[in-house]
Image (cartoon, rainbow, N blue to C red):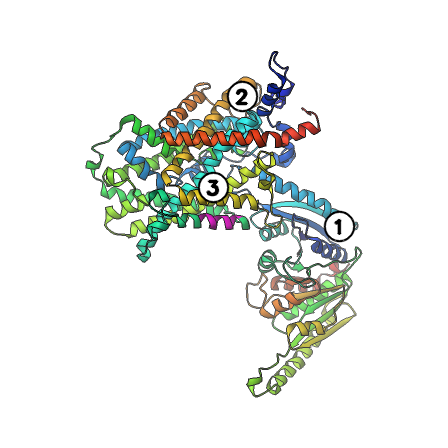
Amino acid sequence: MASVDQSPGQRSPQGGVPARRESLRDHVFRRKPVTAMNAETGVDGGEGELARTIGLFQLTLFGVGATIGTGIFIVLTQAVPIAGPAVVWSFVVAGTVAGLTAICYAELASAVPVSGSSYSYAYATLGEGIAMVVAACLLLEYGVSAAAVAVGWSQYLNELFDNLFGFVIPESFAQAPEQGGILNVPAVILIVLCTLLLIRGASESAKVNAVMVLIKLSVLVLFIAVGVTGWNADNLSNFSPSGLDGIMSAAGIIFFSYIGLDAVSTAGEEVKNPRRNMPLAIIFALVVVTGIYIAVAIVAVAAQPLDAFEGQEAGLAAILESVTGSTWPGTVLAAGAVISIFSVTLVVIYGQTRILFAMGRDGMIPPLFHKVNPRTLTPVPATIIVAVVVSLLAGLVPINFLAEMTSIGTLVAFLVVSVGVIVLRRTAPDLPRGFKVPGYPVTPILSIAGCFWIISDLRAVTIYVFVIWVAVVLLWYFFYGIRHSTLRRAGAAAPEATS
Amino acid sequence: MTLVVGYAPDGRSRAALHLAGALARSAGEDLVVCAVVPVAWPPGPARVDAEYRDHLERTAREAFEEARARLPADVHADFVVEHARSAPAGLLDVAAAREAEAIVVGSSSGGALGRVSLGSASDRLVHSAPIPVAMTPSGYRCPPDARVTRVTAAFGGAEGADDLVVAAAGLAARFGASLRLVSFAVRPRPPYTAGVGRIGDEAAVDEWVEAIRAAADAALADVREHVPHAPDDLDAVIGHGETWDEAIDDVEWDDGDLLVVGSSSIGPLRRVFLGSRASKIVRRSPVPVAVVPRGAAAELADRAVHDEEAHR
């Protein structure tokens, strides 16, 4: 552990490098010492040691529950027109890359005895500057994905209204401007509702959470069971209209439906025999989730011709209706989607506010973000700011762009994590790791290559916007974070106390 | 046996600490000062919010320093941080784990100063606790050596009221306090248009007052007969008024008073169900209130009658 604690500032300056540059480098690569993290999180006492209670089966279930159903309700509409029925392979590609990155993340998480998001792990191992890049990605993975699922929710809500009451929210108030609307009002309302709950300090009990997972699963099973009756092999005749390129581009969008899998990686501390169970659980969860996704996708592409997907709203419900010719299966599916997506949005916004809280504590963003209301014990200002930004995104930006931004953010975050695994093996080879990536160095290299491959096939505009976004965050870091960093101020007050 | 004190991590629970100190000293009990912070969420082993929750726990522990300073030195107190989905749920968990005899909480900060007001947390607590819940009026303070000097039981003469009286007598015996029964006769001013004036009502209320007086005397006689170590100072009073406020102010209240209110006769046996009269009394009380669920009242009464040991 000593090698991680060592401050880069203590290394002898390289000759010829101007002092000012050297100090900038020190800032960017300064790492949060693990001991400081322990003191802060109180894990040095006996209670911080979590008992290893989670077995393989439980961990697999947790992975399935955390992953399934976020994106599958909404991604087909975007992915199928690109890849055709070969979208099935896109799921395999996206799932494989997600699995590789999750396994790499598990090593990083086990190497640093802290808990938190990948931002916290990056701060402890790769330095402040990289942590900021990861944070920029996490803002996409959480904030933007919240907006994306909210837009999907609004589609299913509209479908439900239509079926139940014969009433549809007018186009102007249910679509983003680019798609001929003014503001996606239901999506904004969903965000506001979630925010109010979070400000009050609402949380989902384990029971409610399990019910939500069950609803998602049963809705998908319903879709497969009913949708398969509309099987028409003709729809599969042109299996891969755009070839490999199409498959890869679609994989980029679909990656969105695998976020949540990384939650398994951070559970290392509590897992029995993590060396064996961690990769197995990730693989089993992936097989289950990918299997369900592929079943859904193949049923969907067999049920209707390719061109029907383009611009289809509340896709799964619409397919069921056209297959059965009656509205009830679509209504049940839409109802299930409306309930379970609500819960997903709540969880994602919650995660976002807590990540911002951690950043605020570290001085990377203004202290406003780590202000906690003493009565409700919730970070009220952070929650409101997140709500405003996410509502604007959900109300004004079309869903395919939101989904792609989420995917690229998640992909880059895990690309950094995979690089981090290799870096850490070189810089701190003796660090005790609760879990090591099997097949090192092939696994992290494959993971990195997979991420690059998917990213390179995303739309150019997505990549540009992402690069600009990261640049903005880094500018922010150089003008604000670097000077306000709690680590820097602590360092200035008391010169480096290494353990 | 212990008393569990609900302590908000914001450190605004001074009233509850004061009352808990006085109760613990009177009853010779220990305290468990409990701060409830939110559980890990979403459920599962992932901890995206680790920094956040650790911050909450640390804030709570820091607030304990202040609590320790405020508690009188002769009262033994444990301090625990409980992770739970809500404050009432956390307090009930701790109370169950420690086999506590009662839960002590403060008033909602939204209420009028000097009266008991139920916030969302205390309201739920009062309706779901299997043990008595003691609440302070808003802004309640007492000197560091305070004791409960008089237990005042709200007496409505209904079924189950005898248990409450005996339970209150047992408490008074344990506290070394006197016992008083209080009933409230509220005679609303009739609407001018009703024609009949007050005459009709007046007679009904008078009759009720007679009946309740007789019932209270009978209950006190019962206490004298059956409760060993029953306080010598037994009393029954009736507060009159046109409104509940007037009726409650009509009775003389003392700094060392603890008002004991039973749960309504409807509602589950083990839990508190505040009837309309009980909740009117609780919300207007100028002194600390203990709301006693029927099941707990029966248990306390049983102990008061049979268990000589309890009376030192």
Residue A342 point in image, percent of width and height: 43, 47
Q: Does the magenta stretch include residue A78?
A: no
Q: Which chain carries label 3?
A: A
The disc label shown at residue A348, or none: 3
Query: Within 10 angstroms of label 1, few (less than 14), some, or many (20 or more) residues?
Result: some
Q: What residue type is labelled 3?
A: Val
Query: Within 10 angstroms of label 3, few (less than 14), some, or many (20 or more) residues?
Result: many
- Labels 1 and 2 positioned on one and the same chain: no
Q: Is the magenta stretch mostly helix, strand or loop?
A: helix
Q: In which quarter of the image is residue B18?
A: bottom right
Residue B50 point in image, percent of width and height: 57, 37
The disc label shown at residue A424, or none: 2
Q: Which amino acid does label 2 sit on?
A: Leu
> For the point 28% across and 52% down, which residue is it?
A327
Give the Cα distance between marks 2 and 3: 29 Å
Secondary structure, mark 1, is helix
The disc label shown at residue B70, or none: 1
> For the point 32% across and 58% down, which residue is it?
A165
Secondary structure, mark 2, is helix
Of the pair A260 and A359, the residue shown nearer to us: A359
Q: What stretch is highlighted in magenta?
A: A190-198
Give the Cα distance between marks 1 and 2: 49 Å
- Is any part of residue A309 visible from this angle? yes
Of labels 2 and 3, earlier in sequence is 3
Residue B215 sits above or below residue B74 on the image: below
Left/right of residue B57 with respect to residue A158 in the rendered view: right
Of the pair B177 and A450, the residue shown nearer to us: A450
Residue A161 point in image, percent of width and height: 34, 54
Q: Which chain carries label 1?
A: B
Q: Residue furthest top?
A: A15
